[in-house]
Amino acid sequence: MILNRRFHLGAWGYTPRPMSADPLQRLCAAFQQAIMLVLGDSFAGTDPVIRASTKPEHGDFQCNVAMALGKRLDRQPRDLAEELIAAVDLTDLALTPEVAGPGFINIRLNPEAVATAIMDMDTESLGVQKDEAPGIVVIDMCGVNVSKQMHVGHLRSTIIGDAFARILERLGHDVRRENHLGDWGLPIAMVLHLIRTRGIDPVTLSLTDLDAIYRDAQALAKADHAGLVAARAKNVGPHRIAELETQNEAASEFRAAAGETLVVLQSGDSDLVRDWKTLIEITLDAMNEAVELLGVQLNPEDNRGESFYREKLPAVLEWFESRSLCHEDNGAMVVKFPDRKRPLLIRKSDGGFLYATTDLAAVRVRSQETMATQCIYVVDARQRDHFKDIFDAAEIAGWDQTPNGRHVLYSHTGFGSVLGPDRKPLKTRSGETVTLASLLHEAITRGQIEVRRRAEDSNAPTHGLSTKELDTIGRSVGIGAVKYADLANDLVRDYVFDLDRMVAFEGDTGPYLQYAHARIRSIVRKADDNGSGATIILDTPEERQLALTILRWNDTVHATAASLEPHRIAGFLRDLAENFNRFYQACPVIKTADESTRRSRLRLVDITGRVLADGLNLLGIDAPPHM
Ligand code: ARG
């Protein structure tokens, strides 16, 4: 029953897309074809093992498949290599390859073919092709909780979710960002109850106040049953036992009162509903401030919290019950899975519904009403088991198909924690969790300091810009630095929030890429010519290398969308910026006397700049024209 199809991420690998402009992908396809011609259809899909050459005298690429195949078939690799060369069709792509050593195939690309491919992609889309079967994609992101401060986990969810949205939109999908706000349930009712008993008017509260009340409420509701049992067993004395008994009684009274508040709220009591809405507003105001600082597109209609699903929970239970898909367990209702002990609780024995029930209702709406063919949950890695249960239960319920029969791909992108310099979860000096807004303000300040400092140099391209202009750039640098650090590594990995390193213009940073882009813009500005329409000539190895890198763009975007690994785009951009810097050191552009070389190089520079800006944009990072 559990098919695990959702983890099947499409046939991405070295398998080429039909229209790839990337010479590497085209070589793979051509050699795959040749392997089939020589060895038969049973060898379809063999990885042709093509790698970039490490030495220029070996050509641009090497195909190393003959060695492995020779061993497997007990044949001379060199003979096999010759046969593959005779069979492979590299028309317009490469010169006739040569066999070397034990059976390497050295491939030299046809420079005109590379130049033509580059000129072909010099369009508005920069060679990025739309997906063949676009669909509706829901991205569950942000997920703040009403009455609580946004913390760095919500920062990651928002940044990563936004990058996914941009990438999938770029490929033609209809993306819906959804903020699954924690705006319903007992915790909120406890806050409302406490506000009432304290006689506070919620309108007067800030989110910081609310956060404190939230924590008070949690503490008040906390019974220490284990403590009481232990105290009795250890005979600690009547005083301590009485204290614990009082605490436990008070806690259960508090929870009962909050439960009543929830019932009254649920019944639509106008005063309580008004107060509840006020709490949401206070939370959303603070969230919007952070979202705006981040430059993330999250609109009011994207806020679809847990309360949106509250009327739909009984129907979820009913769906499972009427089809005998759930079981009673001590008065509770659970969904069982064939491959593990842990069941999924969907109704408590007291009749209450849970976080999981709400998520099932959301899955149902997303797949059956929104008709999404892909649902991506960007939620921290600690909720992995929860989402595994939800997705498997969705499959059991039949919500892995849209009503018009398309498969729904569910995935959870669990991300790691953000650590402080001590490698422990980020805390302020006084030990509180760091709020998102404070972190972003600090990043912006650091970006602005860095940009102002650099502008003091009379040779800097930013020298003479107004303070306002510099601060705008500094803001892009600070926020870009945070986003890049968040996206440039494997998402499940924890990372250290180190602003010094993140805002540096050198190293594996966002500002390094932004700076490379700005330098390119300044070259084109100085030349007053973007090389438009020039014939591209790739005479030097540096020009070739830069061009080959640019041609990986389309495949990089598709590979990122299929794997949901933004670090692939980050890595590509780093390669691009590095290859650009090598090119720029070796090949004069503006100072080249020969007009056709100069214009060819300008066109290459301009395309490089546009691909850099496109890539940064897909990661949600600004690309300022001056830096
Ligand atoms: N509010 C939740 C939290 O802070 C995140 C919500 C994630 N989305 C979901 N559909 N469960 O942990």
Image: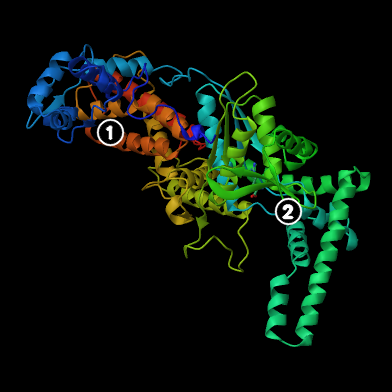
Q: Nearer the viewer, residue 307 or 35?
A: 35
The location of residue 400, given as percent across then percent down, is 59, 29
- Going by the numbered disc 1, the residue's amino acid type is Tyr
Q: Is residue 283 visible?
A: yes
Q: Is mark 2 within 8 Å of ligand 1?
A: no
Of the numbered discs 1 and 2, the one sitting upstream in the chain is 2
Q: In the image, 355: left or right of 420? A: right
Q: Is residue 180 visible?
A: no
Q: Residue furthest right?
A: 270
Q: In the image, 527: left or right of 43? A: right
Mark drawn on residue 282: none
* Residue 367 versus residue 254 in the image, above or below: above
Disc 1 target residue: 584
Q: Residue at x 67, y 26 (%)?
A: 368
As helix, strand or loop, the secondary structure at mark 2 comes to loop
The location of residue 555, given as percent across then percent down, is 38, 26
Tag nearer the camera, 1 or 2: 2
**Label 1 environment density (alpha carbons within 10 Å; few <14, some 14–19, many ≥20):** some
**Label 2 environment density (alpha carbons within 10 Å; few <14, some 14–19, many ≥20):** few
Q: Nearer the viewer, residue 254 or 480?
A: 254
Q: Report the quarter where the C terminus lies.
A: top left
Coloring applied to the structure? rainbow
- Going by the numbered disc 2, the residue's amino acid type is Asn
As helix, strand or loop, the secondary structure at mark 1 comes to helix
Q: In the image, 275: left or right of 222? A: right
The location of residue 24, given as percent across then percent down, is 27, 25
| Disc 1 from disc 2: Cα separation | 72 Å
Disc 2 target residue: 330
Location of residue 468 (image quadrant): top right
